[in-house]
Amino acid sequence: MTSVVGILIIILVVLQLGAKQAVQRIQSDPNLFPSIKEASEKLSQAELELETLKKERIRLSAEREELTAKIGGRPTLALKQKNTQQIQSMQPKPSNPQLAKEMATLKKKNSQLVTSSKTLEENLNQLEKKLSKLPKKSGKPIVRSLRLPDPKEPRPGSKGYRFICQGGKVYPLDYGAWKKRVKDAVDKSGLKKNGAGELADSKAAVEHFKKKPISDAIFAAQPMHSDKSKLIYFRLVPKQTAGDLPTNLGKSQSFFQKFLSKLDPQKSHILFTVFPDSFDAYLEARKILSQKGIPAGWSPSSPQPFAWQHHFDTFTNGRSKLPKPKPSQPQSPLSKAVLD
């Protein structure tokens, strides 16, 4: 038993000495084992990278501590909420409560307008798509058979009335009724007059009739003073609900038919003022007048924002001192008619 144990111990010592010598031999000459050499180099490189990463970690930790110290601690949820409140408190706020309310209302309206604008834009795009699919109309010009009136005198004792053809509609205009309407409005206005019966202050008169406009069921009058002629002109603008389209002229409830029902065909004549956009309406009206036997004439008008204008003898200070008009000048825009 003792001999066996002793032999085992001797063998173990010999193996340890052999392994130690083998390791020393490999380390002294690593080129003898290329794979071991490569592993050794990788190990050395990994150790260098590990050392570099440790240094970078130390640097970043120092920067983090420095930043934490500057902001007064780590950015916790409470700190974030506090900073948000500070930023909101720094925003300018109106000191006037009424102004703040108005600003809120304007913001709401702005949001509604933005939404409405987007909706309109979408609708416009859809309409453009539909229009692009419609068949194209012929480019041939529309020919109208029109002629200027031949000078003809109305019947003796005939009274003239004017019709305005504008915006595709026909508007009857009673000059006599409007002259009386304007005169009554001037008399009731309380405006000062001079010794010649002229309005003393033209500016005050214009402002008065702007604040209290003269109108009837068809027209609203807009005052305008002429410094040259010393007159206040009233520009008649058609109301949106008034006037008749060509398809409505023959109906008994139309403005056109109601006006004609008051006229005597043997003692009346009609003068048309025709705008470029209303020849269809004029031709239809003339057809009806021909059936009723009422003589008429017409004259063209250039485009303008009002239908007709006249002063209705509304004189202002200095009118009486102007040179007298020639005796041949008509006293009324309808006293000398040109019929066809």
Image (cartoon, rainbow, N blue to C red):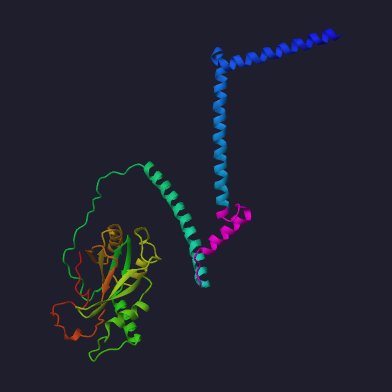
Q: Is residue 312 magenta?
A: no
Q: Is residue 278 left or right of residue 123?
A: left
Residue 138 lies, with reference to residue 107, above or below; the image says above
- Residue 140, image x and y in percent? 25, 45
* Most foreground residue, 114 or 146: 114
Quadrant in which residue 133 is drawn? top left
Asked if residue 261 shows in the view, the reply is no
Q: Is residue 213 left or right of residue 150?
A: right
Residue 76 lies, with reference to residue 148, above or below; the image says above
- Residue 190, image x and y in percent? 34, 88
Q: Is residue 280 left or right of residue 73?
A: left
* Most foreground residue, 85 or 132: 85
Q: Is residue 81 magenta?
A: yes
Q: Residue at x 14, y 80 (%)?
A: 325
Asked if residue 124 shows in the view, the reply is yes
Please identify the residue farthest to the right as the structure is shown.
1
Quadrant in which residue 173 is drawn? bottom left
User: What segment carries the magenta color?
Assistant: 69-95
